[in-house]
């Protein structure tokens, strides 16, 4: 597994940051993309295997130029992890057109753009893996998350399309977390009137009665990116603590 070149989007925080740490520990070369330059600078930037790029992954020219520069610096890409994402809380009738476009651009269009410009590099190597970080809300949903759940559901279609179109040399899988202890979760909880109560509700929704730490998602991503998962493609894997399989009641 060592000495591969791995692009991670949304790399400065949460699951993305955990993935950066995981692959650096495996002596891989990591290309970390994030729009938040200050947060990127808090990564282990002294590690010679880490290359950070401030990039708006919803912008086609920015993605094209960043991936081109990364390839010139480290060589062809082996693994792409499309992790960048945002959350907005609203129903269809409450969502503005600008809010809808923002969520779709960051969550879905970014995955399309990064795959578009990374896959040709993988084709030159005749091997590669694309991992799309979707959500358990691609299968189930809650109230007031219409743009988010739509974008994450569409990522499963993108995953299947990439898997079919670029087989047999390039695999593509989706990882679908439940509640993960990330800054995005913490920020969302703080918007409520009773953050402690909401946090406990998040715990209680899961059969495991715990909120998943980001490193556990990174471990799954690490496995799926490895040759040990060489026969896995086109599938979605839920790491959700049993969220959504329990009806409740007696």
Image: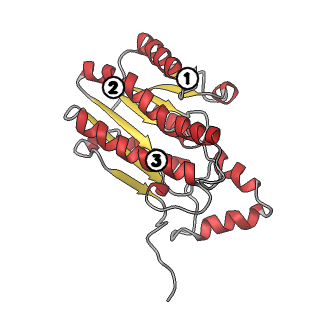
The residue under the point 49% across, 89% down is 250
Instruction: Tell me if residue 129 can be seen.
Output: yes
Question: Nearer the viewer's eye, disc 2 or disc 1?
Answer: 2
Point out residue 32 in the picture as x, y percentages from the top left corner.
53, 27
In this view, the residue in front, 146 or 49, is 146
Spatial distance from mark 2 to mark 3, Cα to Cα? 19 Å
Q: Name the residue under label 3.
A: 134
Q: Mark 2 points at which residue?
A: 119
Task: Using a 10 Å C-alpha cutoff, classify the residue at mark 2 as few (fewer than 14 neighbours), some (14 to 19) or many (20 or more).
Answer: many
Specify which label sits upstream in the sequence, 2 or 3. 2
Spatial distance from mark 3 to mark 1, Cα to Cα? 29 Å
The residue under the point 70% across, 64% down is 198
Query: Which image quarter holds the N terminus?
Result: top left
Instruction: Tell me if residue 26 can be seen.
Output: no
Q: Name the residue under label 1.
A: 47
Spatial distance from mark 2 to mark 1, Cα to Cα? 26 Å
Q: Name the image quarter holding residue 144.
A: bottom right
């Amino acid at each position: 597994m060592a000495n591969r070149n791995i692009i991670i989007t949304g790399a400065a925080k949460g699951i993305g940051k955990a993935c950066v740490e995981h692959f650096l520990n495996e002596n891989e070369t990591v290309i970390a993309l994030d729009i938040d330059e200050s947060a990127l600078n808090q990564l282990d930037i002294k590690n010679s295997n880490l290359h950070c790029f401030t990039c708006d992954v919803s912008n086609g020219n920015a993605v094209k130029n960043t991936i081109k520069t990364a390839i010139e610096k480290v060589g062809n890409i082996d693994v792409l992890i499309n992790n960048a994402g945002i959350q907005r809380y609203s129903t269809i009738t409450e969502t503005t057109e600008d809010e809808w476009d923002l969520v779709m651009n960051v969550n879905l269009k970014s995955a399309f753009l990064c795959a578009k410009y990374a896959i040709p590099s993988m084709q030159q190597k005749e091997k590669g893996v694309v991992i799309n970080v979707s959500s358990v809300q691609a299968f189930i949903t809650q109230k007031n998350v219409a743009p988010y759940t739509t974008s994450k559901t569409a990522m499963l279609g993108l995953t299947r399309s990439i898997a079919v179109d670029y087989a047999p040399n390039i695999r593509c899988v989706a990882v679908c977390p439940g509640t993960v202890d990330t800054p995005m979760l913490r920020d969302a909880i703080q918007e409520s009137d009773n953050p402690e109560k909401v946090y406990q509700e998040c715990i209680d929704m899961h059969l495991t009665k715990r909120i998943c730490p980001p490193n556990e998602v990174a471990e799954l991503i690490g496995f799926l990116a490895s040759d040990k998962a060489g026969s896995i493609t086109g599938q979605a894997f839920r790491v959700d603590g049993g969220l959504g399989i329990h009806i409740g009641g007696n």
